[in-house]
Amino acid sequence: MQKKTECDVLIIGGGPAGGVTAVTAKMNYPEKEILVIREFEKQLVPCAIPYIFGETLGCSDKNVASCGAAADMGISAILGKIEDIDFDKKIAYSKDNAIHFDKLVFATGSTPFVHESLEHSLKLDGVFTVPKNKALIDKAKAYMEGKKHIVVVGTGFIGIEMAMEFAESGNNVTVVGGSKHILKGPFDSEIAVQAEKIMLDAGVTFIGGDRVAAIVDKNGDNIVNGVELKSGRIVDAEVVVLATGYKPNTELALSVGVSSGHYGGIWVDEYMRTANQDVFAVGDCSARRGFITKVPSKVMLASTSAAEGRVAGSSLYGIKYMKSFSGTIAIFSTMVGKTAFSSAGITEDEANSAGADIVVGSFGGMNRHPATIPGAQKQFVKLVATRHGGQIIGGQIIGGNETGEMINIIGLMIESKMTVYQAMSMQVATQPMLTAAPTNYPIVMAAMLAIRQIEA
Ligand SMILES: Cc1cc2nc3c(=O)[nH]c(=O)nc-3n(C[C@H](O)[C@H](O)[C@H](O)COP(=O)(O)OP(=O)(O)OC[C@H]3O[C@@H](n4cnc5c(N)ncnc54)[C@H](O)[C@@H]3O)c2cc1C
């Protein structure tokens, strides 16, 4: 017998997108009853999952998201999985609850993508994906205990973060991927090779430009022994981690007739509304497009999901702010060893393949001034701008920890359609122990060098 539950806004999924939508909705509509239904009691902070596998965190219990603030705000949460929805009656059903809602938000996220040719190998002992599920992550970690030979398939930031954690814990790690360099996509080659060098120096073997043809179980005992590559090469392994991307989790939405957009995500407009104006979708389950190119995008980021949650949470009962979500700027950072790599907007390669007429300004300096300050590290900023008008459309940074926040300056520049001419005279706070020199602030210098290209 299902319990009857009432709410104004039902949010399905308690990941970053669902959580932010709930908080934003409560702030905008304090009188409304907001209910989040989520599958798991303990929700992992997804972005820190790689650090469970090495010494940085060491266990999943140190990586559990806190829901305290939402509860303090009066947001209700229940455990369960929505299995069916009747949009005419406005009722969503889980095994235990029949929840009557006024507005509904899909925040059902994403699940690991595995190429269909490798799917059957997931049943082998020692083959894992990287799901956002504590029980499965604990199972994988327990299996890896005492195993030394690990193959990571996938050269995106999740694969590389996992590989570095394994390597730093003394394992013998090989990364395999179809692209020539790691982190291809968010970084141009000259930046990706620097990340690659750090990874190789940490003892990781990299096989690029080759793909996994099969996962090997040579004894036929359901235990993995390695991977066979398209080139015919075989790499031995006791553990294979498939970090080959994620797909929108839209099984429920599609089963109840919600329309999908590109790459299988739920179709939404700029206010995150589906075709039914009482039904929204946010986060990885929604269909995205690029902020600059406007073409469908596979980018899946917690930061993008949170931004979408803020837009949906303030638009549930009509358009409150003219702040819509006009595409992902694909902004993110990763650490490879002690060096941070950050990217926002589009790369030079991507701009060129999109046929954009661009200029590039790149500047390398130090992140402290003078460079003799203890802990000073090299810093490199690359800006991509339109040749006509100088609008900033992309940026990449290599440097120390400050890189993680500096990329947010570039992100804001892209979102606010700033030009390199405005960036050239940008006023920045500088301090010897904290930043690069005011005379050589790298974002400003990169902007000046881009202007020189425009005017050449
Ligand atoms: C290893 C890893 C590292 C990452 N690192 C970064 C990073 O550094 N920076 C960054 O920006 N992004 C990062 N990401 C991406 C980021 O985690 C995702 O973009 C983000 O989790 C998406 O949030 P979401 O709320 O849309 O979906 P999810 O986090 O997938 O959450 C969806 C939730 O909905 C629940 N759910 C699904 N169906 C139902 C249902 N029917 N009923 C009830 N509940 C349901 C699921 O159980 C899940 O908890 C990383 C991802 C991974 C896996």
Image (cartoon, rainbow, N blue to C red):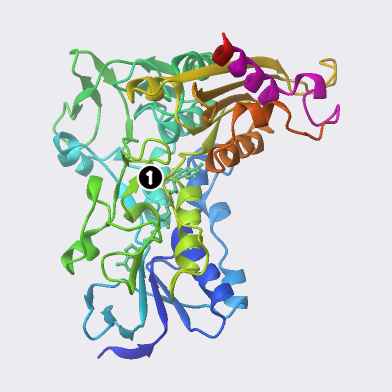
Q: Nearer the viewer, residue 192 or 304?
A: 304
Q: Is residue 448 left or right of residue 343?
A: right
Q: Position of residue 425 (x, y in %)?
A: 73, 28
Q: Is residue 66 magenta?
A: no
Question: As displayed, is residue 213 above or below residue 402?
Answer: above
Question: As displayed, is residue 231 above or below residue 34?
Answer: above
Farthest residue, direction top: 456
Q: Main structural element of the magenta stretch: helix, strand or loop?
A: helix
Q: Quadrant of residue 352?
A: top left
> What residue appears at the point 44 percent right and 78 percent down from the top-left corner?
35
Q: Is residue 441 magenta?
A: yes
Range covered by the magenta-colored residues: 431-452
Residue type (three-letter) at the residue carrying disc 1: Ala
Q: Which residue is mark 1?
A: 140
Q: Quadrant of residue 220?
A: top left
Dividing the image into 4 quarters, which one contains the C terminus?
A: top right
> What residue appears at the point 43 percent right and 36 percent down from the top-left corner?
158
Question: As displayed, is residue 116 above or below residue 382?
Answer: below
